[in-house]
Image: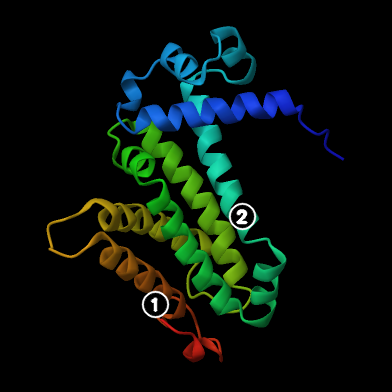
Amino acid sequence: MAKKEDIRVTKTKRDLRKALAALMEHKEFDKITVCDICEEAMINRMTFYKHYMDKYDLLSDVLDYTTMQLRSELATDKAKKLFEDDPSAFFSFAIERIVDLCAEKEAFFRVVTTSENSVIRQMIYDSMRKAFVEFIGEYCKDRKSKYPVETLAVFLTGGVSHLTVYSLVSSEDGRTRQERIDDCKSFFKDFLFSDLFFESEPENAAEISM
């Protein structure tokens, strides 16, 4: 059994994650220093380096923690029952939650997904790809994929990041942000139920409200 993390360490990491996310809402990541993060979190540099090698290590933790939050929401008794009763409905719910989470943390996700920093782009890509490999792998227990799970994960990684950002920040088409977010949710639901990628549609998919 893994040793439980000291509550002081947990609080320090939480404060540092919040500090970085807050700074990235109004400052480019490349221009953020460890000193900036420590000042925002009211933590000294020595404490920072006890937990993270550098700001990239901290950013990685922010992404991992966000993924963990989503997984926790999808692991509740209610979500598990939904998965057992209707896997397609469960994954529709999961897709909606992903988009909603991006909307809730709009400024942060807009920065990290549109960054020109190649290291950040690769970190985002790897984090999302791993999540989709797991996500599609679970879905394929109910439906047979026509393509390798990794191939679909790579396709979704690019699509989700760009379509979600477009849904959150674009204003060129005259629609409201909520209308674009709703379209984004519908698109991903249609993807899950599409015969283009999967062998056959689940029997209860037609009953799911779009």
Residue 140, image quadrant: bottom right
The numbered mark at residue 2 is none
Q: Is residue 201 visible?
A: no
Q: Residue 4 location, x and y as percent? A: 80, 34
In the rendered view, tell whether residue 85 sits above or below residue 182.
Answer: below
Q: Earlier in the sequence, mark 1 or mark 2?
A: 2
Q: Amino acid at mark 2?
A: Arg
Q: Residues within 10 Å of mark 2 (few under 14, many from 20)?
A: few
| Disc 2, SS | helix
Check disc 2 and report the residue beneath it. Answer: 71
Percent x, y for residue 141? 64, 74
User: Taking 135 as reference, is 210 left or right?
Assistant: left
Residue drawn where x is 34% and y is 41% of the image: 107
x then y, percent, for residue 134: 59, 58
| Coordinates of residue 90 in the picture (x, y in percent) | 58, 73
Most extreme residue toward the right, as rendered? Answer: 1
Q: Residue under circle 1?
A: 190
- Tell me the quadrant of the picture where the C terminus can be found: bottom left
The one of 102 and 197 positioned closer to us in this rendering: 102
In this rendering, the count of numbered labels is 2
Q: Are marks 1 and 2 in contact (CB under 8 Å)?
A: no
Residue 193 visible: yes
Measure the alpha-carbon separation of dots 1 and 2.
22 Å
**In the rendered image, which quarter contains the N terminus?**
top right
Q: Nearer the viewer, residue 197 or 16?
A: 16
Q: Is residue 13 above or below residue 155?
A: above
| Residue 109, quarter of the rendered image | top left
Residue at the spot x=38%, y=53% of the render?
Answer: 103
Q: Please, is residue 40 above or below residue 150 in the view?
A: above
- 60 lies above or below 92: above
Position of residue 53 in the picture relative to residue 19 (left or right): right
The residue type indicated by label 1 comes to Asp
